[in-house]
Image (spheres, rainbow, N blue to C red):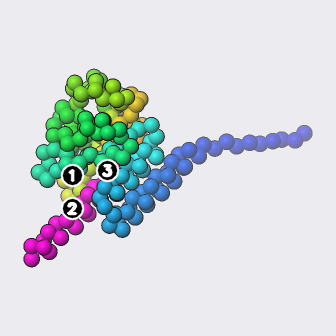
Amino acid sequence: RQLVRCTSTDISARQRDERIAAAERAVLEKVAANAALTESLHAICGYVETVAPGGIAAIGVLAPGGQAFEALLAPRMPADLVALLDRQTIDIRHGSCAASVYLARPIYVADVGSDPHWGSRGERLQRHGVQSTWSVPVRAGGGRVVGAIGLYRREGGLPQQFEAELLADAARLAGIAIARRRAEEALRGSEAKY
């Protein structure tokens, strides 16, 4: 008699970790190479979308003063959806990213149609095919909130642990990119002044 022994190992978690490490390296290389802020933030959106397929990532950068988003960067988001979300004022009822900045904590919305953070705009989001949104504040040095990263999904529900960790990591990378760009702008302004 012969014995055949087979072993089956799930390597999906390891493959996901490898994709995360490669995407992080690519983003940090852009930041280190002094790439434009939009280029770095687009790379972060691509990183999130690669690791959490089925969603559209967006990063809102706060305007000086922190009362509204200055820009919404979402390379894969349809233009009419960007128009709905762009330049929102920071308030608890202006969407999950604005609420995330306002409360300075992650906001996970399982159903945009019934969530108070979206109000009447939740129905408009659903017409665009968005059922759930997950948002995390972006912090710069010293913990100061400088924006938010959001993932807009066609399926309802809350994030799994790895998805929440992914958004937190992407927010950290975005904070590095935004802080570096603002520091360079302040330095250039100071040099021009003197």
Image x and y of residue 87, in percent? 20, 42
Question: Residue farthest to the bottom?
Answer: 194
Q: CA distance from mark 3 to mark 2?
A: 16 Å
Which disc is residue 171 wearing? Answer: 3
Looking at the picture, which amino acid does disc 2 mark? Arg
Dot 1 falls on a residue whose secondary structure is strand
Looking at the picture, which amino acid does disc 3 mark? Ala
The residue sitting at 63% across, 44% down in the picture is 9
Side of 4 relative to 50 (left or right):
right
The residue sitting at 50% across, 52% down in the picture is 19
Q: Is residue 120 above or below residue 180?
A: above
Residue corresponding to mark 2: 182
Dot 3 falls on a residue whose secondary structure is helix
Answer with mark 1 or mark 2, whichever residue precedes in sequence. Answer: 1
Which disc is residue 138 wearing? Answer: none
Residue 111, visible in the rendered structure = no
Segment colored magenta = 170-194
Q: CA distance from mark 1 to mark 3?
A: 10 Å
Numbered label tally = 3
Which disc is residue 146 wearing? Answer: 1
Image x and y of residue 65, in percent? 11, 51
